[in-house]
Amino acid sequence: KLQEENVKLKQQSSESISKLQEESIKLKQQNSESVSKLQEENIKLQKAQTVSKLQNTESKRRQSYKRRTSSSNNISKLQEENVKLKQQSSESISKLQEENQRASSSNNKIQKAFQSYKRRTSSS
């Protein structure tokens, strides 16, 4: 009886060991698959992070270019406006000089007429 029971126990023990080994193999396989999935996900996240950094860098570069271009355009507009203002100023000066010359000429005529009047009145 003891021998039979011993044989049964050994058989049960052997079956339990086999089941545990199978379960261990399954768990190792599942673990390996989980590690692979996590590594793939990690690679995807790293790629996404790299793309995000590149987009951010590109966005900053564009903003910087827009600021420089805008500043350059503003300078160009101000220079054009300055040229126009100088031209208008020059034209205004020319007109004032012409008016001044006419006034001076008119003044000279009035003085000559007055001198002539004085001579005529003093001689009579």
Image (spheres, helix red, strand yellow):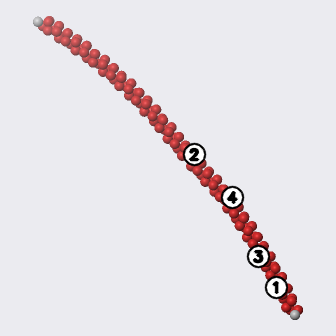
- Of 91 and 62, the residue lying toward us: 91
Q: Earlier in the sequence, mark 2 or mark 1?
A: 2
Provide residue 21's location: percent of width, then percent of height: 28, 16
Label 3 SS: helix
Residue 20 falls in image quadrant? top left
Q: Determine contact: label 1, label 4, CB under 8 Å.
A: no
Give the vertical position of 25 relative to 52 (above or below).
above
The answer to whether residue 19 is left or right of residue 66 is left
Q: Which residue is mark 4?
A: 83
Residue depicted at 48% across the width and 35% down the height: 50
Q: Determine contact: label 3, label 1, CB under 8 Å.
A: no
- Report the Cα–Cα distance between label 4 and label 3: 30 Å
- Of 26 and 64, the residue lying toward us: 64
Provide residue 121's location: percent of width, then percent of height: 85, 91
Residue type at tag 3: Ala
Q: Which residue is mark 1?
A: 114
The answer to whether residue 76 is left or right of residue 118 is left
Q: Which residue is mark 2?
A: 65
Foreground tag (1 vs 4): 1
Residue type at tag 1: Phe
